[in-house]
Image (cartoon, grey):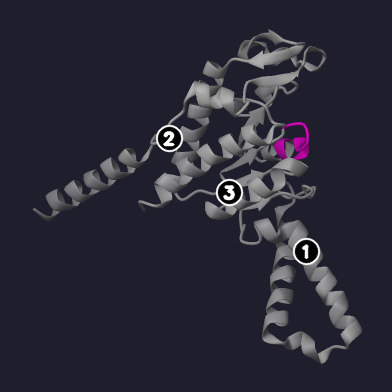
Amino acid sequence: MLDMIKTTEKTTKTEKASSQKNVFSLDVSEMQKAGLHFGHKTSKIHPKMGEYLSGIRNGVHIIDAEKTKEKLHEALTFIQDVISKGGKIVFVGTKIQAKELTKSTAEECKQPYIVNRWLGGTFTNLEVIKKRIDYFKDLENKKTTGELEKYTKKERLIFDKELKDLETKLGGIKEMNKLPEAIIVMDMIKDEIAIKEAKQKKVKIIAVADTNCDPTLVDFPIPANDDAMSSVKYILEKIKQAILSIKTND
């Protein structure tokens, strides 16, 4: 009887987890309104993006919004799967216009992020990065507890400057104690080092793939405009909805 109850509870949890997934709503007209379909000038096309294009308008490649919908759905489904299993996803958006949106989305989703320069070795030399994070957290703690008060004013100013620098470089990954299950990259060209390190360490890659990018470099390409704020905001909003729909019901 007890085994039957446990089996029923397990089944109920599985059904609940399943029901939490795929709650996102994707609409082609909304994507077009947000400008996801506008690519780069024809001179900047990457040949491997051909399958995701629907034509040319005023010398600019147009991305097939139906293909974007299909690939975004695949990416969101994968993201939900990672989150439902307790995995972590690092948001990477170092392009100026994407920084604040990327950071705020990651923070709302309680996920790590990098919105300033990607530090070489973040994945490939994680032990060194972790030592810097430990030093950063220790210095933060000393400031909070007043341990730095014993130093001169000039020395405290040096510590404050160092803390600010460490916050800029490591603040978003301060709680990252191991490699994440995946990364989300908002600009494949700008953050190509992040993609290379993720591939080297077999971390899954979700990325916005504009018409000048090679979509085969990542596991889950999302063919879309990576320059327009409206496009970036639309994609990040859908990612946030996908993650929070899982976490809210945990």
Whether residue 214 appears in this view of the structure is yes
- Label 3 sits on what residue type? Thr
1 vs 141, left or right, is: left
Residue 246, relative to residue 210: is it above or below? Answer: below
Q: What stretch is highlighted in magenta?
A: 188-195
Residue 151, relative to residue 101: is it above or below? Answer: below
User: What's the residue at 75%, 21% (across, down)?
Assistant: 212
Label 3 sits on a secondary structure element that is: helix
User: What's the residue at 62%, 39% (across, down)?
Assistant: 184
What residue sits right under mark 2 in the picture? 24
Pick the residue in front: 145 or 44: 44
What residue sits right under mark 3 in the picture? 105
What residue sits right under mark 1 in the picture? 166
Residue 29 at x, y = what percent? 51, 22
Residue 185 at x, y = what percent? 66, 38
Q: How crowded is the residue under tag 1: few (<14 C-alpha within 10 Å), some, or many (20+)?
A: some
The CA span between labels 1 and 3 is 21 Å
Residue 32 at x, y = what percent? 57, 22
Residue 77 sits in quarter = top left
Residue 174, relative to residue 115: is it above or below? Answer: below
